[in-house]
Amino acid sequence: MLLVSACLAGINCRYDGKNTKIEEIVKLVKDGKAIPICPEVIAGLCIPRDSCEILVTDDGEKKVISRSNEDFTEVYKRGAQQTLTIAKTIGINTAILKARSPSCGSGLIYDGTFSGTLLNGYGFTAELLLENGIRVYTEEDFIFKKE
């Protein structure tokens, strides 16, 4: 069983109220091979919501800041923890998560300036899953492996 970002499964849960559906991931869900989840929604954020990015402070602390400069760090931490709890309960060992997301990004994330600049790093959920032995891929990794 896989864990997948709900937006990749066609669920309109992104910050902008849209999705980033990938038919192969929808099929995995329909075939009972994947469970869709949105860490931001299970943490209580609304749809739509202000976009957020991870800002790394001068002392190396990661914060999730909205475009309107509101701090959502604790909400994102809560969503990551709830996602991990679900993954452990179900026995998930692999996740396909949305690239560059402040929750789900793996390898590259936006730098907190809302300028489109990327930096090496992980979203809060991706990082927590990895720390707990769950393999994390992005949809870009998934697509690459399918070609």
Image (cartoon, grey):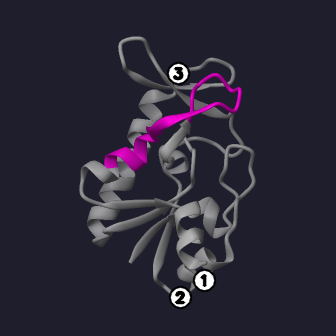
Crowding near pointer 1: few (<14 within 10 Å), some, many (20+)? few
How far apart marks 3 and 2 lie (CA) works out to 38 Å
The three-letter code of the residue at mark 2 reads Asp
Q: Of residues 97 and 38, which is closer to you in this image?
A: 97
Instruction: Specify which label sits upstream in the sequence, 3 or 2.
Output: 2
Position of 91 relative to 43 (above/below)? below
Q: Which residue is mark 1?
A: 27
Q: Is residue 55 left or right of residue 46?
A: left
**Badge 3 vs badge 2, beta-carbon distance below 8 Å:** no
Q: Helix, strand, or loop for circle 3?
A: loop
The image quadrant where one finds the N terminus is bottom left
Crowding near pointer 3: few (<14 within 10 Å), some, many (20+)? some
Q: Helix, strand, or loop for circle 1?
A: helix
Q: Position of residue 130 (x, y in %)?
A: 31, 52
- Residue 71, numbered label: 3
Check residue 17 for magenta coloring.
no
The three-letter code of the residue at mark 3 reads Asp
Q: Which residue is mark 2?
A: 31
